[in-house]
Amino acid sequence: MPPTRTVIRPHARDNQLSPIPIDFDPETLGWVLDEGGRGNLMLQNELFNTMEDTWDRLRSNLNKIKKAVAKLPFNLQPWTEKGREPSAAALEKAAFVEHALHNQKAATWEGQHNFQATIYELLDAVARGISVLEIDWTIEHGKYVPAGTRRVPWTCLGFETPSHLQTFPHSNSSALRLFPDRDKSNPKQFEKYPHKFLVGVYRAKSGHIAETAQLRALAHLWLGRMLGWEWMTHKAELFGLPIRWATYDPAASQTQIDQVSDMLRNMGTAAWGAFPQGTDLQILNGSTPGVAGKSEPTERLMAIADRSCDLLFLGQTLTSEEGSSGSYALGNVHREVELDLYENYASYVIDVINNQLIPSMIELNWGNADELPFLEVELARPEKDQKMVERDKLLFQDMGLPVSKQWLYDRHKVPAPGPKEDLFQSPQASGLSSQVSSTPGAPISVSAPSGGTTSASSASANSPCSCHLPTAVAAASESTASFLARQAAGQIAFAAQLATTDLKTHDLVWSGGDCPECNPLNNTTYPANWTTPPPLHHNCDCEIMVQVQAR
């Protein structure tokens, strides 16, 4: 079927009244959860809708995590092999996907979602376990682009029943199925509608997909909270109003007693009363019998439910509880726990986009799934980033441990610069020039990262490469210990190469010099032009090649 065709169309059944009874009790709740665990997603989500509509803390927490993740900077990266530059085709695909995703003009009044709203809707699976969206495709400038997405109603989602397992040979009772015509006897696999749906499944526990919803764990606490609210409201109705107290003469007649009782009753809606002479009337302030405050059982039920809701979705309570206090360090710990969960939620969204939406965009327009671009998310973690920088400085600068530049780029999420990009030069790196002596013929002393020095005599290097200023700058990314070890190994390897090479028929040729020091040695031979083998300076990657002499 063409991708521009709509699969799920609005139906009156999507808006029918909930089959869940209004008066909840533990038995009803258990029945709904059992039905949901068996695959009745529509009934289970009616319960979840009721929970979200009647629990302010739950709605606030879910909206908080959805908004926080949806507004994160999602950056699109072109596909490339590690350590290499992306191809022209990879850059073209990345530019197309980025433009299409960030320039959507979704018809929000028709229920369509743009890219940010799509992320918001996909995050509904964090609470409900499943979120399915249909992609609306359009054609712009000859290419398929997603105009937006629309939520698939729960009446169109479910699982295969035992009768389906007997009818269809490849049935799977654990796999999510689509019911586009709302007929539960006619399940469809999502593979039948390629490029049409985004299926998000957020697993909070192992087992059947229908049981992964985190709201299932809060359902009983929600019921206790609702009952506690009902009991507290009833108590306020009984004891929160001022008490009207009248003392009458024991010798009063029944007629007088009835008049006093009627007048007390009428004072509930009127601010006046007429009592027989001798009646002692008192108005007592309302009070709550028994314990009150945080130890009040009804308030405890609601507080326990709210706390559990915070722990489940935010991982902590310090950033959500009113009046909570603690040390600055404790606040940072709670915040880091919350950010860890945000990273998990963002990773789930990225997995859906990178493995479902972006491949569809590329396949529909290029006819293949090669060199797929991918999304990355940036989540500011100042505390974590600072600790990472301090650790890397200790290992790679102070201790001189060798490390790949590409690994550091990936670790700190810094894109490697291209060959023609204008590079930032830090003042600290520029200041290294003052530490290097550039007097011709004098020994060159370079400050090592650990604070020591290394010396090299210019007389021992009979070549143009004598480790001048650029060497000191390059040394910032290679420790002195690593350079000396490579230099010793290079001399041993060259001695072995020299012993096995017949210089009458073959030449030892310098190769790979792309720095100002070594470039003049390129394609020159031993011993006419040089006698010291590489490496001659920090980060030198030159090699000695054996070539047959030209006749």
Image: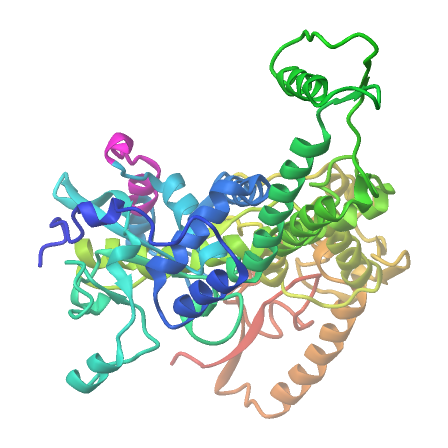
Q: Residue 313, can we see it?
A: yes
Residue 81 part of the magenta-drawn span = no
The one of 411 and 473 positioned closer to us in this rendering: 411
Residue sitting at the far right = 452
Residue sitting at the far left = 1
The one of 424 and 438 positioned closer to us in this rendering: 424
Name the residue located 79 percent from the left edge and 53 percent from the top edge: 390
The one of 51 and 269 positioned closer to us in this rendering: 269
Residue 101 part of the magenta-drawn span = yes
Q: Is residue 67 above or below residue 368?
A: above
Write down the quadrant of residue 200 in the picture. Answer: bottom left
Extent of the magenta region: 96-110
Q: Image check: 119 left or right of 365?
A: right
Write down the quadrant of residue 148 in the picture. Answer: top left
Tell me which secondary structure the magenta stretch mostly adopts. Answer: helix
Name the residue located 64 percent from the left edge and 44 percent from the top edge: 231
Position in image of residue 81 (x %, y %): 43, 65
Q: Image check: 534 left or right of 244?
A: left
